[in-house]
Structure formats: structure tokens, C-alpha cells
Image (cartoon, rainbow, N blue to C red):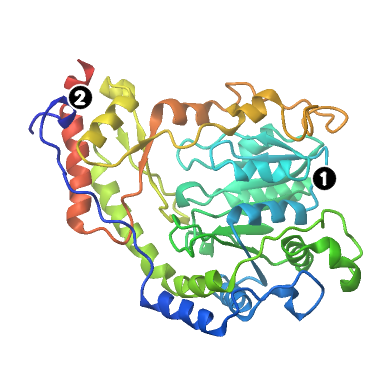
Amino acid sequence: MAKLALCGGKPVRADPFPRYVTIGEEEKRAVMEVLDTGVLSGYLGTWSPQFYGGPRVRKLEREWEEYFGVRHAVSVNSATSGLYAAVGAAGVSPGDEVIVSPYTMTASATGALMYNAVPVFADIDPETFCITPETIRQVLSPRTKAIITVDLFGHPADFDGIMALAAEHNLVVIEDAAQAPGAQYHGRFAGTLAHIGVFSLNCHKTIQCGEGGVVVTNDDRFAERLQLIRNHGEVVVGNKGVDDISNLIGFNYRMTEVEAAIASEQLKKLERLLLPRIEAADFLRDRLKHLRGITPPVVRDCVRHGYYEFAIRYDAQALGVHRDRFVEALNAEGIPMYKGYMKPIYLEPMYQSRTGYGANGCPFTPPYYEGNVNYEKGICPVTERMYLEELMFTDLVHASLAAKDLEDVVTGIDKVLEHTHELQD
């Protein structure tokens, strides 16, 4: 092949890849129907028929329940809000510990801090990038109240083991399925595998309404608490007759009628937007699986992967080139590839300095917390290795791509692999 673009050669691809587009005429019509009513939100923050929102919000929730086979779906204005509400509904209290993944968007951990609890980080599996029953068990303590799992990149965690461990220790499990709508584990949908599940409808996700989320549960009590936290619960509990009012200081986590209308149309498209992702990922996995130094995503036998991103493990020792240099060379060839994903959350300044609320260490230090949580570098070696050395990823598996686009991805990787000697120099 020709000289690397990074070294002055012609790139494999000069044109940008197609943008992922999920919005069509259906969503436009649904939005116009809402605008014609003149009602953009149907909520009131009081115990009244409007406590549960407008007709489009309630329609979306019933559709979500039917699609995913759950008793309750509670729409929210973001998956972050959904995670916060889920932690509150689970009864997490000041001084508790919540076990979380260090390798995800930070909201999975800050949900614990919202209730003055302390995040404790369990390391990830090097193949699925999810926390595991074994790594969770290593950080359990008498203060553990809940576990937040993350189906990272669209691969569900080992829920049989995690739920068994949770039952053994009377813990609530919250599933962050933001990246895994439509993914499955033993034939069951991601997001429905724990006590509470959280979906994202953010603009970058497989289906979206700009911003938004849905929280699901089969537990009537959790559902009621989620609804109260979503919509000013502190002024609703009296008239509603709620006895346990702990954690029910409410927020405005409400979805608009416009967002709900878009989300309803997007839900209808989930399977036809997901299947091309799986097909594209299968194509790339097949073409990359025999390449030296490259390991495409592992998919466990019991799983249907959601492929929010296509994550590749890179072996610098086999290739003699640091991952960051390899990614730089791929980008120069016109192949968007990213390195490392998220910095391990515990290395962020808030955790390193134990600074949360105020300047006195709340909730990390006594008298708020009597434990001795460890946020030192090295506590999650697999996570740190993935971030610093091994993991690279691309979003080029979405439904707007053509076969030629996927061929260019493979050609770019092949070209850089063939010229690693130039990168060594």
C-alpha cells in the first residue's frame, strides 16, 4: 500500500463519513401535531391528574412498557436525571456506599453523591468492559446499599451473577442501559435486567429525541418514588398520602410533550436502527479478527450486543507502536478512531480531593461517612490499562453507513498495520 497519510501519503478517505440520521417525516408530523394543540407540557407539580404529565408523555410510557415488557416506565428529561431518581428511589442514604463502574460517563457515579452517599469503584472485565460479580464482591462492605451497572458500548453485564450477589446481600441493582437499547441478555432486554433500569434518549444514542430518558421497573413502590422525585415530590406526598417520604425532595426531571412525541416515533424504529449496527459490527469483527495486534469486540454467547460504539483492544507489544500513535495514523487516513474512552472516574479532581458539597469533605469524610474509600491510582488496573494503552473505538457501525464506508474502515486499519514500521521511526 501507499505511504501513510501521517507521513505525507494520500489518505484512504478524503470525504467525511455519513452522519447518523434517525429523524424523518414521522417525527416531523408528530411534532406538528403537538404544536397544533398548543400544549408543550402537561405537567403540574401537585397531586392532580396532571401530576403524571400530558397525553404524549403518558402514551410514550405505556408504549415503552409494552415494548420492553415491564410494569412501569417513567419518562425523564435525561438519563442522568433517571439515574439520580433511581438512586433516590432505591433508598440510598448519607453514609451509604454505592458500587459503580469507573469506566463510564460520570453521572453513573454522581447519582450516589446526589444523596450524600459515596461511590466505590469496581474494576471492569477486559472483554466486555462491564463490572462483574467478582470485582463487585471485592469492594463490598457493610455500608454497601446499591450497585449501578453499565452496559458499556451496548454489551450487557453478567446479570445472573450480579443479581444473585445482590440478593445475597440485600442490595438494589440499577442498570444503566443508556448505550444498550434493544440489546439482550438470555433473550431479555437490557434495561429490564435489574431492579431499576435507565435508558437514554440523548441525541447521540441509537434512538433519540434530543434529550430525554426512560426509567423502568417492575416494582410498584420504586415506580411511585421515581414519579415523585421526577415531579416536585415534597409538595405532593401529603395529598397523595405517601408514608415513607425519605429521599422524596423532588426535582423537575419532566419530559416535554414534543420530546415524548419524537420518542414514540423513534421507539417504533428501534429494531430497524439496531439491526444495521449489528450487521456492520459483524462485518468489521469478521474482517478484523485475524489481524495482528487487533482484537474486535467480544460478544458473549448469551448476548445480543447493542453496538453504541465499536470497541477494539490494541496490543502495543505485538505491534511495537503505542496505541495513541496508531490512532493518530488512522485519523490521518480519514478513519475516525478515538482512544481510551473515559478517564477512570476516581481520578477526577472531585474524588482525588474528596470535595463534594461545601468545603468540608461532604460526603466523603466523617461525620458524613465512616468508611475509608480508596481512590488511588491503581485500584482498577484493567480500567486504567484500557484507558491509557489498549482501548480504541469508533462509532462507524450506525444505520446511515453503506458497505463502501465499512470497507474504508477495514482498508484504513490494514494500511496502518502494514506501515507500523514508519510509526516506529
Q: Report how far apart the C-alphas of labels 2 and 1 lie in the structure.
A: 53 Å
- Amino acid identity at mark 2: Thr
**In the rendered image, which residue does mark 2 sit on?**
420
Answer above or below: position of 186 versus 51.
Answer: above
Rendered location of residue 72, percent (x, y) = 67, 70
Q: Secondary structure at mark 2?
A: helix
**In the rendered image, which residue does mark 1 sit on?**
93
- Amino acid identity at mark 1: Ser
Q: Nearer the viewer, mark 2 or mark 1?
A: 1
In the image, is 355 to the left or to the right of 33?
right
| In-front residue for pair 12/297 | 12
Q: Secondary structure at mark 1?
A: loop
In the image, is 379 to the left or to the right of 330?
right
Q: Quadrant of the C terminus?
A: top left
Q: Residue at x 67, y 72 (%)?
A: 71
| In-front residue for pair 270/259 | 259
Rendered location of residue 260, percent (x, y) = 55, 72
> Which residue, as the protein is rendered here, is positioned at the far top?
425
Q: Residue at x 49, y 36 (%)?
A: 342
Rendered location of residue 134, percent (x, y) = 62, 37
